[in-house]
Amino acid sequence: MPSAVDPGDDLWMAIKQISQSTSDSDYIEQLVPVMRDGRYASQLEQAFSQFSVEREHEIEQICNANHQEFVSSVNSLLQVREGTVQMTTQILELNESIQGSIEHLAEQKKALVDSRGVRQNIDEATQALNACLDVLRLANQVHDLLVKKNHYAALRALDELQTIHLKEVSRYKIAELIEKSVPATQKLIGEAVMADLNTWLFRIRESSQFLGEFAFYYTDVRRNRNQARTEADERFAKFKLNSPMELVADETDEFDILSNDEADINIEFTPLFEAMHIHETLGKSDYFRTEYASTRRRQKDLLIPPSLNLLDENCGDLSSLLESIAGFAIIEKATMAKTDNFRQLVDVDELWDSMCQSAITLITNSLPTVENDELLLKIKGRIALFMLTMEKSGYSVSTMNNLLLTLFEKYAELLKLRFSDDFQEIVTTDDYMPMPINSIEEYDKVVSVSWYTPDKEREQLTFPCILPFSQMYPLCCIDIRNFLNQIYLFSDDYFQRSTVIDETLRTSLDELLCEKVCQSLVDRLSSQYPGQIVQILTNLEHFETACSELQDLLFQARSSTSATGPVILEATEQFKAAKKTASDRIFELVNSKIDDLIETAEYDWMATKPNKEPSNYMQELTRYLSNIMNSVLLALPTDIKEFIYFDALSHASTAILQLPLDDSVKRITPGAVQTLATDAAFLSSFVESLNNPILMENLDELMQTVTLMGSDNSDEFFDVAQRNRKYGKVDQIKGAILTTKVAEGTAVAAQSPAKPAERFATLGSRFGIR
């Protein structure tokens, strides 16, 4: 068979190398490339067969040459082969045993590997679980802190949970769930802290009134202390409460109105600070500031009642309102002081102005119901105490000044009304008689309250005695002094309108004196009793003096330092005018009585014989003048009394002269003239007895006219020189009329049997004419 494989080619060389392999693995490793080579795909089997045949052939050659040795070798080889087979069997058994052990070991190793994975998974799961448990614990701790109202700690725990612990478990679903719940928890913390803050706000609103009450109490303590300081040292008198000097004097007084053990007051701002910090942490500071301001505005509205009762004598409603406002405002100032840029000054001032305006509106609306000046003074006192307290706290109280002015106007009106009634009652119930004084004590009391300068020294008086004025004068003086004191009481605490007080006092006092005293006295001048008119005139005289004294007193007591010039009371002129009216009324009554008496004169102007005695009316007239001078007019000042007498005599002279001038008298006989001359001489002697030469001048016209009527030479009257010398006071027309009437009467009388010489024999001697 031809050779399929060239012994010298590459395939043959590869087969030789394969046959020389020392192990199966080398054999396989060399065989596999040859088998994969496509060039040898059809020749490989032939090549292996050829290589086997050649090897058998070589073996035969070797065996043929060494057959016995070969047989021995074969036997040895068979023995070896048998031993090899046994050993192979043992090796296979050992291999099987090893394989079993290896399989068991592999199973154990696999189990070990599996257990290590499980353990690692368990460890990882444990770590994850612990981390989640820590997160849950912190989440629960946040809620526990909320329950314990430890809001800031809860917020810190939540922040720690969010920024640190959630990142450690971010791959787990629980982290996502808790992350989603963080905003809700933050909102819950915010709501919880706001709930606590609202509770705190409610408590401080409820305690505002007590806080304000205690602030009022402390202001009153300071006021009393300042007053005591003023009494001890007059230099402090010009320093008011809340002045820098007063604050320096009290600088050692450590007083904290928000923390006072004596009053059991302790207002902590911790809830506010906590709420501020939490909202700042949450990034909601502006929202919190706005919400807080809105809450305070609502609380402010709750402080203001719908109406106010000012009729309570203890001013309970008003005190509660002002104390609540004061406490509220003090909290606001304290909030500003304890926080940084949390409460704006403009917001606090707006709340303050709003509360003040509400209080002013309530008080103003209720003011018309107050009809008692003492109650109004109490109301003013509470408002003044409120203003002093709030001024010390740093608030402006200028808006309350107009309210005080309104109160003062109302107070002045009520005082005027009350004192008007008092003056009216005094004037109405007075007896208009000189005031009797029974003891030195009574005298001292009357003089101390009245503007009166006695004519005698106190030691020279004997009791009982009589004062010139009636009882109404000292009573009115007491009321005037009380009115002054009551008016100035209003300015004792806090009232900066001193000019208004001075002017109101002047005008009110003027009105009271003019309308209620002076006018009432003038109205009483219609009385028909001269004694009462004289007493009214005496009272008016003293009231005029009192007004002058009052002007000086008001000038000295003037509370305004800017006012200049004297204080002028219109009442002074009113009383002066009333004095003139009273004097005129006395003149009127006296003259009326004189007219009545003169009207009773029964002159027979055609009488042929004169009356040797004064006429009855003349006697009554002089008696009346004497009585009124010594009784009714006795209490009047001398100048007024003389003036009344002067006017009365002048009126009487004129009225007597009017008798012969009457149109009904056509003729006057010498006898009638002699009768008239007798009456005139009687009147003249009466006036002479008064020892007042001035009064005699009132009778000059009467006496010269009567002399002219009785003159034998009436032509002298028509001679200017003679008339001026003898009849200078006689009216020319009246003198001419009377001389004509006398001439005609003389002519008629001449026809009668009586001789004219007898009728006029003594006429000239009566008038000193010879």
Image (tube, rainbow, N blue to C red):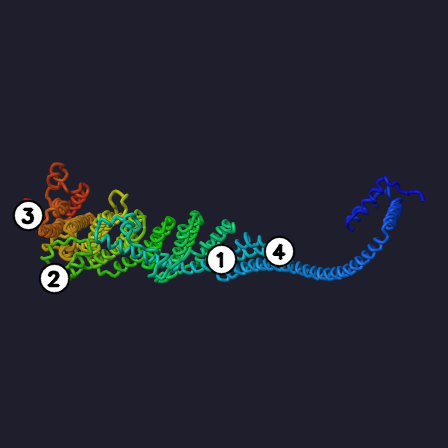
Marked residue nearer the N-terminal end (1 or 2): 1
Marked residue nearer the N-terminal end (3 or 2): 2
550 sits to left or right of 272: left
For the residues marked 1 and 4, what is the alpha-carbon distance in whole angstroms?
A: 28 Å
Q: Where is residue 729 drawn, in percent x and y?
A: 14, 42
Q: Where is residue 417 drawn, in percent x and y?
A: 32, 56
Check disc 3 and report its element: helix, strand or loop. Answer: helix
Check disc 4 and report its element: helix, strand or loop. Answer: loop
Q: Where is residue 294 drawn, in percent x and y?
A: 49, 53
From what the image shows, is residue 731 above or below residue 274?
A: above
In this rendering, the label closer to the viewer, 1 or 3: 1
Marked residue nearer the N-terminal end (1 or 4): 1
Q: Amino acid at mark 3?
A: Ser
Q: Which residue is under mark 1?
A: 151
Q: Report the number of numbered marks.
A: 4
For the residues marked 1 and 3, what is the alpha-carbon distance in whole angstroms?
A: 132 Å
Q: Quadrant of the C terminus?
A: top left
Q: Which residue is under mark 3?
A: 765
Q: Which residue is under mark 4?
A: 172
Q: Amino acid at mark 1?
A: His
Q: Does the CB distance between marks 1 and 3 fall below 8 Å?
A: no
Specify the quadrant of the image occupied by residue 525: bottom left
Q: Judge whether residue 618 can be spotted in this image.
A: no
In this rendering, the label closer to the viewer, 3 or 2: 2
For the residues marked 1 and 2, what is the alpha-carbon distance in whole angstroms?
A: 90 Å
Specify the quadrant of the image occupied by residue 528: bottom left
Q: Which residue is under mark 2?
A: 463
Alpha-carbon neighbours of circle 4 within 10 Å: few (<14), some, or many (≥20)?
A: few
Front position in the image: 303 or 204: 204
Check disc 1 and report its element: helix, strand or loop. Answer: helix
In this rendering, the label closer to the viewer, 3 or 4: 4
For the residues marked 4 and 2, what is the alpha-carbon distance in whole angstroms?
A: 118 Å
